[in-house]
Image (cartoon, rainbow, N blue to C red):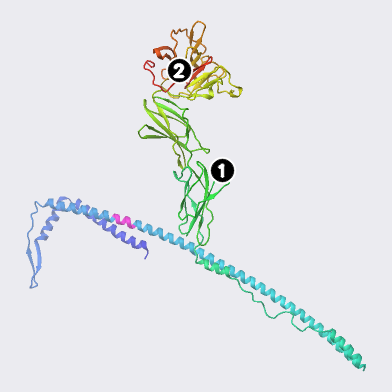
Amino acid sequence: MDLYEVLGGRLDVIEEESEQQDFSRESSRMEGPTAGQDRVAQGARGALQRFSVGTNESLRFEPCDTPSPTGEDDGRDDVFKYTESENDVIRNKLQKKVAEMENFAGHLEEIFLTVEENFGRREQHLEQHYNDVLQTLSQRYDDRAAALQEEKKSKLEALYGQLLDCGRALDANKELIESAQEVHRCHDKRLFLKVCSLKFAKDNMDLTLSTSLEFNTPLSDLSDVKTMMDSINVVPAPSAPVINPQSPNSASQTSLHVCWSLFSDDTVEYYELYYRPVLEECSLSGSADSPVKETHCTVSDLLPNAQYELWVTATNTTGISPASEKALYMTVPSPPVLNQRGYMSCPESALIRWESGNTNPVDSYTVEISEVSSDGTEIAVPSCQCLVQLQSGRSYIISVRAVNIGGPSERSEGLTVITKGTYFSLLEETSHHCLCFSEDMLTISYGYEDPPISAMAFDDIGFTRCVAVLGDLIAVRGCHYWEVEVDDGTEYRVGVAYEDTDRNSYLGANTTSWCMRHILTPTRHKYEFLHNGWSPDLRITVNPVRIGVALDYDRGTLSFFNVDLSQHLHTFQCNFINYIHPCFGLDNPGELSIRNGIEAPKFTFI
């Protein structure tokens, strides 16, 4: 009987019983309280009479105590409720059993199909082996029959040739006999003996057979047939394995964890994994240190952020499988290199920049931000810079990881950011060739001697006329503040400019820059606040040595202060349409120092 017929019949019986229980419960509910009371009364009447059999075998009825129909309804309702809950539990158990049996039947069906498939493969394999054996034996028979026919032909040709020779010898002997008879008739006995002895001595006939009558019986080498017959009962060579695609976080900077799979019916003793880097200039390849028993392996001593081709073979006692198709895996990138000076920060955010540090591109980067002695957060970004939102007056440690399919790299070296004020660095590539910078890139100087021509950079980025340099772009809206320290004997320009300001012009002489200028005259110190070549007529009596610069994007103002006196010097009213760069210039030999990352005084933004 089929499995499904048995299971189906059992399942139908269970379902029918469950439906009958549901039907009886629903009918009891639909009858209402009156019908319920009738059933109780009938039950009571049925309980009034009981029969018993005495020793005289006569049937007699005895009355029995019947409880009052009033006062017992609540108990019966409780019984009904309890019975209903029991039925629900039983029905749930039956449904669960039904589900389990259905799952078991499905599992048996899968096993049945697998057995059928495996049997078909084995039957096909056996038929192929026997066909090969029969083909080999048939070929051997044809070869032996052809050789035997050739040998027969050669023997018959040799005997036929010898038979012709015998015929010719008989003819010659007949002629000799006739000659001897003629000589004998001449009655010269001496001549007769002489002629006969000469002729018989000359014509000796070889009466031995020229070929053997036996046929050669060569030894039959059926070792390959025996091997083929033995291989019928041997496990076939495994099929080609299949390397799984690389899974996320399955690599390190110098290693790869590789997984593969194989047809379930194949028998394998071990695997061998091979790999080589996907580099045009590199033709080296390698393999795992030793054969692998499992369907996974970790390959070590690899290059970071490098792409590798991998393939695998399976081996058993019969032979080696074909190689799998090649799969591409990647190792984890090297840690990025944070630009320790090329970042910009303000009280509520920071613009972080870094270099990839990898030859091959990476998928993304993860910026990790943490306050000192506290847990951090992570931000995923696609490029080599990120604007992060921070809280004012805090100290943060920021690091970056590079990420590809293999996983994240190690953390970069941490960058400490303190959000007390606006911090920026100077862009050395924009500077005039006469400027020199201190080690911390916060002091610029203009020497008395011109640098050699080899040190000059003639391009479109650096200033060519004004001896100046730009600071990093302040790409965050809001308020920003920094200070410049100068001395009385230095002519300078301090202000801001757009990124596309004319490098062959002076700061403040065009529409893309605003600056405060100090000029030394024979009689006094002159100060100008230049934009597009125009300055208001202002006189400053006390020479500032600490100049505060306050930029407010939202209000569109740029203000200058004498910090030592808390004195306001001048404010530009301008609607900045783009982000701006701080700029600093020297009109004569001297130096100036920049103080940034400091908290703005209270009098600057009122």
Q: Residues within 10 Å of mark 1 (few under 14, many from 20)?
A: few
Let me know if residue 69 appears in the view. Answer: yes
Quadrant of the image occupied by residue 21 = bottom left
Let me know if residue 35 appears in the view. Answer: no
| Magenta-tinted stretch | 95-101
| Quadrant holding the C terminus | top left
Q: Position of residue 67 (x, y in %)?
A: 8, 56
Question: What label sits on residue 573 in the rendered view?
Answer: none
Residue marked by disc 2: 484
Q: Position of residue 61 (x, y in %)?
A: 8, 66
Residue marked by disc 1: 279
Q: Residue furthest top?
A: 523
- Is 96 part of what is drawn in magenta? yes
Which residue shows up at 54% across the image and 56% down it?
Answer: 322
**Count of all numbered marks drawn on residues in the image:** 2
Q: Residues within 10 Å of mark 2 (few under 14, many from 20)?
A: many
Q: Main secondary structure of the magenta part?
A: helix
| Quadrant holding the N terminus | bottom left
Which residue is more in the foreground, 545 or 324? 545
Mark 1 against mark 2, which lies toward the viewer? Answer: 2
* Apparent side of residue 528 relative to residue 464 in the rendered image (left or right): left
